[in-house]
Amino acid sequence: MKTLNKSIDELLTMIKSDEISVEELVISYLEQIEKTNDKLKAYITIDREGAINKAKEIDKKKQQGAKMGALAGIPMVASDDISTKGIRTTLNSKMLENYIPPFNATVIDKLYEEDSILLGKSNIREFGVGVSSNPWGAATAIENNEAAFGLVSDTIGEARQSAVTHNLYGLKPTYGMVSRFGLIGSSPSFEQIGIIAKHIDDLHTVFELVKGKDQKDSTSLDVDVNGFSNSITDSLEGIKIAIPKELFIEGTIIKTINLMERLGANIEFISIPSLEYVLQVYEIISSGEFSSNMGKFDGITFGYRASDYKNIDELYSKSRAESFGEAVKKKIIFGNFVLSSNYYKDYYEKSQRIRAMIKKELKEVFNQYDVILTPVINKESELGRDLFTIPANIGGLPALSMPNIDNDLGVQLMGPAFSENKLFAITSVFAKEMKIGGEI
């Protein structure tokens, strides 16, 4: 159905003009999911009944002339680590296979207030680190017309990497710009709820609706990025773009660089020496945080509980051993190692100091340049696959990915804190020129 490939604005126009009812639209998406999910495995849980009931409510509101939300009738997908009241949220793990949250994440509540409709929960890696039949389920769903947009956790670049591999746009906001309340995370200083969409204007629309201070999240911030930068409209004249040689593969994103220069951007190659350590710093600090946060999954308070045990210690160990996958166990063990008294200073504390140095050097770059341009996925090394996306998570900085006109590595723009407006504006000019995913 061609309708499912339309932008949010186009779908809203169709609904407002009675070209299609919300119920008809939602059923079309659900039918698409039912046709493809066995093969694509984009969804872990599909809330067919809840989505249709919500669609009927919105149609009724429209008929009664009641005030409609900004996303009235627009279907979304959320990754399976974002809490949804009454809808199973498993993190793709046996530990939480039957967990049904009693509350919504703040981002879900905000979108419900705008009358968006949740179709279901998308496939992810187990606790963000384990194996999965489709680790990037939300992006798969959106590309295959199984949702109009999606919310996903971004700890190492998941929103951006999954977006570019599915010809979509992905955003990791500044740390604190979007509430993390209700995100069942594991590495809290790195993770942020990101957004994936087919069109750059859709990405911006959703961001504006979910951003902002949340009293339930002490890390959230009350900062207004004021939408788009009014100084960037049809060209990139005067925009200074840096490309760190440490985050560049020779011969890649050449067409992107050339096009941005033709649009007026001034692009320079630079060096940020501390970026050499981003992978090690991330692995050590995130593992320490992961092991600490996973302690609550003990088979006692909630989650999977072993049935055969002799004492409390055996209940604890068997519940975790039987319900966690191998990758999750390895990260917990490594995290315990770097946090142990014998190795804390040599590993965890030293990594925190290097992290501070990375953030300082990035800040210095942004004193001279507007944005940093890099590929998104490092295919030269499986171990270093996340090299290009992790710096934004280490620094808590906003980063926006877009399809690449050169190859499937993707293109990423990273800016200083709270520069989402500039990232949207630059990407909009680029997209308009290339006709990628529409324009704003």
Image (spheres, helix red, strand yellow):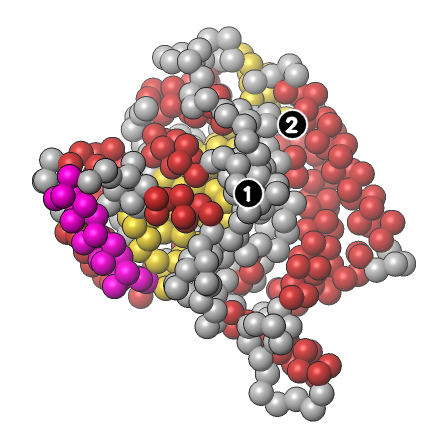
Residue at 26% x, 57% y is 51
Front residue of this view, candidates 145 and 258:
145
N-terminal label among 1 and 2: 1
Judging by the rendered image, the residue that carries numbered circle 2 is: 245
Residue at 73% x, 81% y is 313
Residue at 62% x, 76% y is 300
The spot of residue 436 in percent (x, y) is: 33, 30
Front residue of this view, candidates 84 and 171:
84
The vertical placement of 198 against 257, above or below, is below
Can residue 154 be seen in this snapshot? no
Q: In the structure shown, which secondary structural element does the residue marked by tag 2 occupy? A: helix
Compute the Cα span from label 1 to label 2: 41 Å
Type of the residue with mark 1: Gln
Q: Magenta-highlighted stretch: main secondary structure?
A: helix
Judging by the rendered image, the residue that carries numbered circle 1 is: 215
The spot of residue 146 in percent (x, y) is: 28, 52
Q: Residue furthest right?
A: 342
Q: Which mark is residue 90?
A: none
The vertical placement of 240 against 128, above or below, is above
Q: Residues within 10 Å of mark 2 (few under 14, many from 20)?
A: some
Residues in magenta, as a range: 46-65
